[in-house]
């Protein structure tokens, strides 16, 4: 990395307001936990629709009651407050109900990505100590249970005590049996939901670190509840909105920007297991969808639909687009061709509940497309150089964040927690950025070599570690290369063991069977050597320069 520039101007620290003008802080009404948000929604929005999936629908009263039935089933199964319960399923109404039910039982939600292979899921189940796994029998032709069994057969240590698996398909006998078993504990479930404390851990989301080993980010109820009330209020969610939920429920944006925010505001969620632009346009026309969130790729797919101009999209009002490589043209087309009244861009990371900055409704197209907006309420930003010294406006350095929405720490990793958050509460994001004269954050790059592939975070170190498990690969390096649909995708450079001839196609197939598809490299380049510095580390910037020159 090139040295960061310095100047003598005063350091730039920007802070968000105490709260949005005219918007009450949700903690004022004593709902600092997700279960209390749910109980409030049942009372306030009871007869309005909370979930709609195909021909099925649930009012807020029915949604919360169904979640409490799940909580009762968990209590019957012996789950105590603070125990971990995992989900491994696509976006469905049952998945949303289970997620809320886990919170109402006072348990900690551990969501797993549906693209994980068996060994990845097994490792996180073991490390989290999840007692129960809610899952589906098959998704995209893959049988999740079979993958877990295969992972355990390969390495019994990765999953020594398989958790109880509960199917969440609506026509499953196992699902109905689980709910029936808890029927007698319904009153206990209501009491448990009331007893959850704001500072309790609500969710552990595993995200990769620079070492390549996924870290469990522990997020509290109060940080999520207060933070997403502020975030969704700024980004335009309103009572009565009809929100398409295509962001996976295994991701903080799908869980919180989607399910939690809708529960807070009294908006309707339409779960979508797989994003299909034609189906999305059908839903917008038939159901009057008003609010969309997602990475640039989904909006590019919508805009690329051949019959877009013939569609009736008058209901669309607001959208949030996050991720890398957001072009001015994309934002212009979202306003013009999709007819949106408000488009917001934002910046965040899982360690801060994905809550750092967002643009405002009154911002120009240039600000929305060229920056990530200003700090959310209660958030402070600072840019620091490589020595930890605060930098001036316009200078590029590491983005530092101080916020009440920070994680409580990494699961079972106090050392890594201490490295991420200093004694004064500043979180080192590992991302590079600058503060413009108007106080907006401009993200310049990723110090931690993180790629954003279609909205998913992919860390080069994790992919490199997986490649090095191949018996014929001696050295591996991964960079991001531009992709028209996904923003960027991984490209791997590998050096084989001496005298071994590697087939790039075979390596792609091998790695694709071991890690989630969004993490897997799209391109493999076999090399005799890689550029190394004096300490033996691969010089990624030189690899990127060489790749651009091809």
Image (cartoon, rainbow, N blue to C red):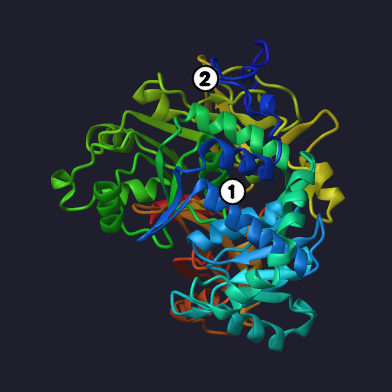
At mark 1, the secondary structure is helix
User: What label does residue 143 carry, if any?
Assistant: none
Q: Is residue 481 left or right of residue 8?
A: left
- From the image, tell me which residue sits under label 2: 436
Residue 163 visible (yes or no): yes
What x and y, as percent, mark residue 540? 58, 52
What x and y, as percent, mark residue 116? 57, 69
CA distance for labels 2 and 1: 28 Å
Q: Quadrant of residue 392?
A: top right
Q: Nearer the viewer, residue 267 or 202?
A: 267
Q: Is residue 226 left or right of residue 489?
A: right
**How many badges with numbers are in the image?**
2
Q: Nearer the viewer, residue 202 or 204?
A: 202
Of marks 2 and 1, which one's residue comes earlier in the chain?
Answer: 1
What x and y, as percent, mark residue 290? 35, 39
At mark 2, the secondary structure is loop
- From the image, tell me which residue sits under label 1: 252
Q: Answer above or below: position of 28 versus 270.
A: above
Residue positioned 71% across, 42% down in the render: 221
Decide: few, some or many residues near mark 1? Use Cα within 10 Å; few <14, some 14-19, many ≥20.
many
Q: Quadrant of residue 74?
A: bottom right
Q: Is residue 333 left or right of residue 507?
A: left
Decide: few, some or many residues near mark 2? Use Cα within 10 Å; few <14, some 14-19, many ≥20.
some
């Amino acid at each position: 990395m090139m040295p960061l520039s310095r100047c003598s101007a005063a350091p730039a620290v920007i802070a968000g307001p105490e709260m949005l003008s005219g918007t009450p802080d949700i903690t004022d009404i004593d709902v600092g936990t997700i279960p209390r948000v749910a109980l409030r929604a049942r009372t306030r929005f009871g007869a309005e629709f909370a979930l709609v999936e195909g021909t099925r629908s649930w009012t807020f009263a029915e949604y919360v009651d169904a979640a409490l039935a799940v909580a009762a089933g968990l209590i019957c199964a012996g789950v105590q407050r603070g125990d971990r319960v995992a989900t491994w399923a696509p976006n469905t109404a049952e998945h949303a109900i289970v997620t809320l039910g886990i919170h109402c039982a006072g348990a900690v939600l551990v969501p797993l990505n549906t693209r994980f292979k068996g060994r990845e899921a097994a490792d996180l189940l073991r490390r989290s100590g999840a007692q129960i796994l809610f899952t589906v029998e098959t998704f995209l032709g893959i049988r999740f249970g079979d993958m877990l069994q295969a992972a355990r057969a390969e390495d019994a240590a990765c999953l020594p005590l398989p958790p109880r698996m509960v199917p969440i398909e609506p026509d499953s006998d196992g699902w109905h049996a689980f709910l029936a078993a808890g029927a007698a504990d319904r009153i206990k479930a209501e009491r448990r939901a009331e007893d959850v404390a704001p500072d309790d851990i609500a969710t552990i989301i595993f995200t990769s670190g620079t070492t390549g080993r996924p870290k469990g980010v522990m997020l509290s109820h109060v940080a999520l509840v207060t933070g997403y009330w502020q975030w969704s209020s700024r980004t335009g969610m309103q009572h009565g909105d009809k929100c398409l939920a295509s962001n996976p429920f295994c991701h903080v944006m799908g869980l919180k920007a989607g399910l939690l925010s809708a529960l807070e505001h009294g908006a309707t969620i339409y779960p979508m297991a797989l994003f299909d632009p034609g189906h999305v346009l059908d839903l917008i026309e038939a159901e009057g969808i008003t609010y969309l969130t997602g990475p640039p790729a989904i909006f590019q797919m919508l805009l690329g639909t051949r019959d877009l101009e013939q569609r009736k999209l008058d209901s669309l009002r607001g959208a949030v687009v996050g991720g890398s490589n957001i072009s001015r043209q994309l934002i212009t087309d979202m306003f013009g061709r999709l007819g949106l009244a408000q488009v917001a861009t934002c910046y965040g990371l899982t360690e801060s509940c994905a809550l750092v900055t967002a643009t405002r409704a009154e911002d120009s197209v240039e600000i929305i497309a060229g920056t990530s907006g200003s700090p959310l309420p209660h958030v402070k930003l600072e840019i620091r150089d490589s020595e930890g010294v605060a930098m001036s406006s316009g200078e590029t350095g590491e983005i530092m964040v101080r916020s009440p929405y920070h994680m409580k720490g990494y699961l079972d990793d106090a050392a890594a927690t201490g490295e991420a958050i200093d004694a004064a509460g500043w979180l080192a994001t590992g991302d590079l950025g600058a503060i413009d004269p108007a106080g907006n954050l401009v993200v310049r790059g990723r110090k931690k070599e993180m790629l954003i592939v279609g909205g998913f975070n992919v860390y080069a170190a994790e992919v490199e570690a997986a490649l090095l498990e191949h018996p014929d690969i001696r050295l591996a390096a991964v960079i991001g290369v531009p992709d028209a649909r996904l923003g960027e995708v991984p490209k791997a450079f590998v050096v084989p063991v001496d005298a071994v001839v590697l087939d790039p196609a075979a390596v792609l197939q091998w790695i694709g069977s071991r890690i989630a598809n969004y993490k897997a490299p799209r391109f493999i380049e076999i090399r005799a050597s890689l550029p190394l510095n004096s300490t033996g580390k691969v010089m990624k910037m030189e690899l990127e320069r060489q790749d651009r020159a091809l």
